[in-house]
Amino acid sequence: MDEDNQGNTSPYDNPQQFYSERIRYETSDGDFFHVDLKYLKDFTNNDESESKSTRSKGLVVILHGFESNSYSHLVIDMARSYLMEGFDVAAINFRGCSVEDILVGDDDKGKVQRRNIPNNNLGGYHLGFTEDLEFFLSQISSDESFEGLPIYLSGFSLGANAILKFLGESSCHKIDKYNIQGAAVTSVPLEIVLSASMLNTPGINKELYSRNLINSFKSKFISKYSGENKEKLPSSVYDKVMNAKFIYELEDSYLTNAYPQFKNHMDYYGKVQCKNFLNEISVPVLGINAQDDPFFHPEMSLEDNMDHIFMRFERNGGHCGFLFHQERDVGFNKNTENNKSQCTTSWMPRELARFISHVHQSNL
């Protein structure tokens, strides 16, 4: 459904109608994940697009952060920014993170509720989980509808780490095979080992961020392993997860059980932090971080000799910050015959999109 047919509904309020389609991908290990796509041709029929051309410049693949999904305001904001620059968008949902909006009650008085879609396997995703990203890239590389389109990667927080890890561990042959031309990421956890204790710091980090993330994880965990499904995992793991008060306790119980290659949370951080892979990246990358990000240690930095990586450390912005959605009057719309207002995208997503557009133009 194109956005003109959504009336005055904001894409942030109705993401299910914002996307052109959702595709479910079945994986070889008996699991699945969803990808939500928005095509430029479905976006250029309204006044938001800066270009009226329906010919896409390429495809931007977006990866979300921990306990987020493709319906989050930040993902929608990023998607709209890339669409405004003339790109198609594919937002990957990590396993177990997909949500859907359903109508509860009768049609007149029913309310829309958002529910999580649990995945099949014990494991879902983690900071270094790149399998589904590569699986999706392999699928579209053989899809005629994406043939010849340059591919760009974008993500935030956990998703940013996974993207940079993937780029660093991928051979030049693989980068060429998938036609990956560049990446733009934000809130990048460059040194997870150094920043490991930050989320446990008393105050807003522990009481707001950590508590919300843990509660979100536990809620999905209870839904997934209620009733007979509880027998699918050791009782000790279930109890440890439910008693966890810190994120590292979730990682030491649940994550190490699902992924035995990690001995404990510090071993996990050391093996997957993207800083280990940055020197091997061969495509241009922009990273935007904030110096006041409460998740990251203030001494976290990046070497100066990274040929393809451009890191910007802004003074303010917090974690996944730089966000605002300003309503602007776009006047009379001849298609809907109604006056309507639209949201402008935020500074950070626009900066990421400008960089990808610049890289694309440089490659022409």
Image (cartoon, rainbow, N blue to C red):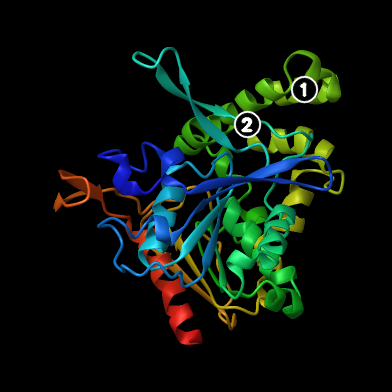
Height in image: 296 above or below 228?
below
> In the rendered view, does 47 fall on the left or right side of 246?
left
Which quadrant of the rendered structure holds the N terminus? top left
Q: Could you tell me if residue 290 is visible in this image?
A: no
Q: Are marks 2 and 1 in contact (CB under 8 Å)?
A: no
Q: Position of residue 169 (x, y in %)?
A: 75, 69
At 43% from the left and 66% from the top, the residue drawn is: 352
Q: Position of residue 177 (x, y in %)?
A: 71, 75
Residue type highlighted by circle 2 = Ile
Between the residue at mark 2 and the residue at mark 1, the CA separation in whole angstroms equals 19 Å
Mark nearer the N terminus (2 vs 1): 2
At 75% from the left and 79% from the top, the residue drawn is: 173
Q: What label does residue 238 carry, if any?
A: 1
Query: Which marked residue is nearer to the observer: mark 2 or mark 1?
Result: 2
In the foreground, 6 or 295: 6
> In the rendered view, does 217 fall on the left or right side of 123?
left
Q: Position of residue 251 (x, y in %)?
A: 73, 38
* Mark 2 surroundings within 10 Å by alpha-carbon count, few (fewer than 14), some (14 through 19), many (20 or more): some
**Can you tell which quarter of the image residue 115 is in?**
top right
At 70% from the left and 24% from the top, the residue drawn is: 224
The count of marks equals: 2
Q: Which residue is mark 2?
A: 117
**Can you tell which quarter of the image residue 260 is in?**
top right
Residue type highlighted by circle 1 = Tyr
* Mark 1 surroundings within 10 Å by alpha-carbon count, few (fewer than 14), some (14 through 19), many (20 or more): some
